[in-house]
Image: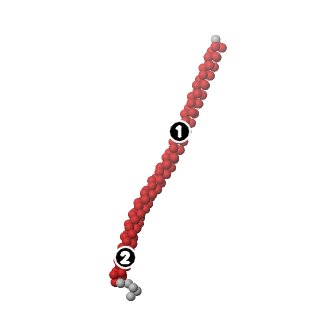
Amino acid sequence: FFGWTMSSAFDVAERGLGKLQAAQRVNAENEEIANMTTNQLYSQGEQLDNADRMAKGLQDDTARGSKLLKELKWRIFKEKLCMYMMILILLGADIGLALYFFHYKCANKKSN
């Protein structure tokens, strides 16, 4: 029937079975690679989530640090302003005393 013998039919069946088994092995390898890739992607996703949380934390720290620096600059400015005012007051007092003593000395010379 169709020119096939029983042994040739078995040969064809064995070759087909061999190809099927090879395809199943390739499929199993592909499935293993897919599982490993999925695990790697999951791990990388966790790493990215951690990096994102750390970046947000750094942004918060930077904003807080920037606010503290502004407050510190303002405080330093107020202290310097106060110091300059004190210097001006003391300088004015020195000039006032110098003028008073100079005027007093001149007034004493005229009276002598």
Q: Which mark is residue 15?
A: 2
Of residues 85 and 1, the one nearer the viewer is 1
The image quadrant of residue 1 is: bottom left
Which residue appears at 47% of the width and 53% of the height?
55
Q: Is residue 75 above or below residue 109?
A: below
SS for tag 2? helix
Q: Amino acid at mark 1?
A: Ile
Q: What x and y, as percent, mark residue 83?
A: 54, 33
Residue 81 appears in the figure: yes
The image quadrant of residue 19 is: bottom left
Residue 42 appears in the figure: no
Q: Is residue 84 above or below residue 39?
A: above
Which residue appears at 41% of the width and 66% of the height?
34
Q: Is residue 12 above or below residue 35?
A: below
Q: What x and y, as percent, mark residue 73?
A: 53, 41
Quote the CA–CA distance across marks 1 and 2.
89 Å
